[in-house]
């Protein structure tokens, strides 16, 4: 009888655990904690260690010197190097510049496209937005490769332009910053259009009618009604372009030249060719800081405006 | 709005021209006879034949499909659990932090995820001897980190729209929570789970950067082969491979779109 009771108690305990929300939440939480959050601790640790000709190619920060004696040696050399060598600084600057200009170009091309789809007849909208997403589903690498065939000196674009007599000599677009912009805007346009479309399609049209009744012209209607309402989608889309472009590696590598290096390219070279893991880790942390900074500033200004005007916050 | 019909049409034509012209050019040139990718010398399907004989490419493609399927399955299980706990247990302690952590991989640049994952795997190997070397397992784990975030978003938005009163009714009638999940909740969110699986699969087989960091000798995925052959000089087989992939994906997406449209009509 006792063993039966014990079994039953164990069963109640187990089923209690199964019923507990923690049994559901714990698995994804553990996975993220182990494989997404802790890796950053190792990035920090290795960025502070010294490079070495060893396997793996760095010296541990914590080393046991003799029995029970542990030596901790932090090396900030990798960080100093980043701000000392113009190669790293120009790569960092180039990443910021490329990400900003690419985002602006995505807004210029993507806004009219998203707006046109959102104002199309209802039965056209779903197929149209599906056709915007379709390139996203096809291989990223192959889409960049397609542009290589179009942009190079004897490529499709130059053949067409010269065949039509528009230019006499082939344009040098491949291996320039222009090619990088084209590749990036092309690859990330769907990420911008989708959230913007989602906002535009839910726009309150009665406000537009009201504005029209009050005598606002189409341009005024757009600037005073549509544009302010679409800001959340616009910001979401811009973030989805800006952040991944900052870490971009493939597009500047395939379409760009020696003067279009971005943080991603330098990280890649340091890691795989130079085997300088500490410098690559320090670069990764610089990139991460550059991405977190705008968020923190945004939050800070939001908080401040809430404090200044408590009524508006409610 | 009528006055702008012409302008709208122009925007749509220009936008879609920009999106599809490069893809069309790859498809057309895949039937080019010439070895030189940009010189047209007549129709031929010989590059498709060459593709079928390229053992390195086929092996890499098979490995990518395996990694993609494993990643998608793992990401769907973990992502669904994460979405479920985010929607149903809103007041659980630490939920805001959990929410932030599940969404963070969405915006983390791939190169940082790749580097961080490799450094973790190297350090883990030094500490516990697992994982021994890099290969299929480490790629799957690293891919699951970001694929799971996408699955969570897709499943979560579906779960948020599901009426929880049916689940409560089943619980009132004495069904155990696990039974309720499998008989009531799961069938209603099945379309989102399928969509999430396909999304995770696509993300995994398309990934170059994270796979390059977390792969080892002998585990070369399809994007890695394509990347090195594109870098070394364009081989015309890539056009044929691209066309095959574009066709397959288009057919799958169109079927998925039709199925979703049908289920919406019902």
Image (tube, rainbow, N blue to C red):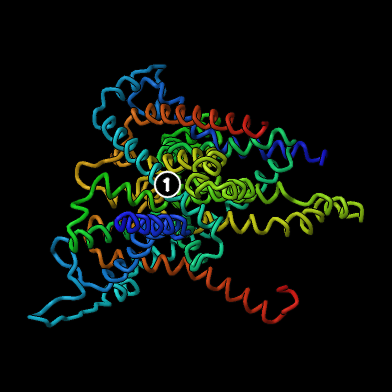
Judging by the rendered image, the residue that carries numbered circle 1 is B77
**Whether residue B118 is situated above or below residue A171 in the rendered picture:** below
In the depicted view, which residue is nearer to us: A86 or B203? Answer: B203
Q: Is residue A89 left or right of residue B96?
A: left
The local crowd at label 1, few if under 14, some if 14 to 19, many if 20 or more residues have their Cα within 10 Å, is some
Secondary-structure class at tag 1: helix
Residue B182 percent location from the top left of the image: 49, 42
Rendered-image quadrant of the N terminus of chain A: bottom left
In the depicted view, which residue is nearer to us: A182 or A286? Answer: A286
Rendered-image quadrant of the C terminus of chain A: bottom right
Q: Which residue lies furthest to the front in this view?
A: A1
Count of labels shown?
1
**Whether residue B62 is situated above or below residue A277 in the rendered picture:** above
Residue drawn at point x = 57 percent, y = 30 percent? B259
Residue A127 percent location from the top left of the image: 63, 33
Residue drawn at point x = 86 percent, y = 52 percent? A217
Residue A293 percent location from the top left of the image: 49, 71
Residue A304 percent location from the top left of the image: 63, 79
Q: In this view, does B153 lie to the left or right of A18?
A: right
Residue drawn at point x = 24 percent, y = 32 percent? B56
In the depicted view, which residue is nearer to us: A15 or A162? Answer: A15
Label 1 lies in what chain?
A: B
Residue A13 can be seen, yes or no: yes
């Amino acid at each position: 009888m006792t063993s039966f009771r014990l079994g039953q108690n164990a069963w109640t305990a187990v089923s209690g655990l199964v019923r507990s929300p923690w049994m559901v939440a714990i698995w994804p939480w553990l996975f993220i904690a182990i494989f997404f959050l802790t890796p950053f601790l190792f990035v920090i640790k290795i960025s502070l260690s010294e490079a070495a000709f060893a396997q793996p190619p760095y010296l541990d920060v914590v080393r046991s010197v003799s029995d029970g004696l542990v030596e901790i040696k932090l090396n900030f050399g990798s960080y100093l190097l980043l701000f000392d060598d113009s190669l790293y600084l120009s790569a960092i600057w180039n990443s910021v510049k490329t990400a900003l200009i690419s985002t602006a170009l995505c807004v210029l091309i993507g806004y009219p496209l998203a707006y046109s789809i959102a104002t199309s007849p209802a039965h056209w909208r779903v197929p149209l937005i599906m056709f915007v997403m379709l390139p996203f589903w096809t291989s990223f690498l192959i889409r960049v490769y397609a542009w290589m065939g179009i942009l190079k000196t004897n490529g499709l674009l130059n053949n067409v332009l010269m065949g039509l007599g528009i230019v006499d000599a082939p344009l040098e677009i491949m291996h320039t910053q222009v090619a990088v912009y084209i590749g990036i805007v092309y690859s990330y346009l769907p990420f911008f259009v989708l959230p913007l479309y989602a906002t535009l399609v839910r726009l309150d049209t009665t406000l537009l009618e009201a504005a029209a009744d009050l005598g606002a012209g189409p341009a005024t209607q757009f600037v005073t009604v549509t544009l302010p309402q679409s800001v959340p989608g616009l910001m979401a889309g811009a973030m989805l372009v800006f952040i991944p472009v900052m870490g971009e590696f493939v597009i500047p590598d395939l379409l760009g030249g020696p003067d279009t290096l971005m943080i991603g390219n330098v990280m890649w070279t340091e890691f795989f060719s130079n085997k300088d893991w500490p410098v690559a880790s320090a670069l990764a942390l610089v990139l991460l800081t550059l991405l977190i900074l705008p968020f923190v500033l945004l939050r800070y200004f939001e908080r401040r405006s809430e404090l200044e005007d408590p009524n508006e916050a409610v | 709005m009528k006055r702008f019909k012409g302008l709208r049409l122009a925007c749509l034509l220009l936008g879609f021209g920009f999106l599809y012209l490069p893809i069309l050019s790859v498809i057309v040139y895949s039937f080019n006879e010439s070895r030189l990718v940009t010189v047209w010398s007549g129709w031929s399907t010989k590059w498709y034949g060459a593709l079928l004989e390229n053992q390195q490419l086929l092996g890499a493609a098979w490995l990518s499909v395996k990694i993609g399927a494993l990643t998608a399955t793992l990401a769907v299980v973990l992502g669904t659990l994460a979405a479920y706990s985010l929607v149903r247990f809103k007041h659980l302690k630490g939920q805001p932090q959990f929410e932030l952590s599940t969404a963070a991989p969405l915006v983390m640049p791939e190169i940082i995820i790749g580097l961080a994952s490799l450094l973790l795997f190297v350090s883990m190997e030094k500490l516990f001897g697992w994982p021994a070397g890099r290969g299929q397992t480490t790629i799957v784990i690293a891919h699951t980190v970001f694929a799971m975030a996408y699955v969570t978003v897709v499943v979560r938005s579906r779960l948020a729209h599901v009426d929880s009163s049916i689940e409560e009714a089943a619980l009132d009638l004495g069904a155990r929570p696990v039974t309720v999940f499998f008989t009531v909740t799961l069938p209603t969110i099945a379309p989102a789970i399928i969509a999430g699986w396909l999304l995770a699969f696509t993300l995994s087989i398309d990934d170059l950067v994270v796979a390059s960091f977390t792969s080892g000798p002998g585990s070369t995925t399809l994007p890695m082969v394509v990347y090195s052959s594109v870098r070394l000089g364009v081989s015309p087989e890539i056009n044929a491979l691209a066309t095959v992939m574009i066709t397959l994906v288009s057919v799958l997406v169109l079927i998925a779109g039709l199925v979703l449209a049908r289920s919406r009509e019902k």
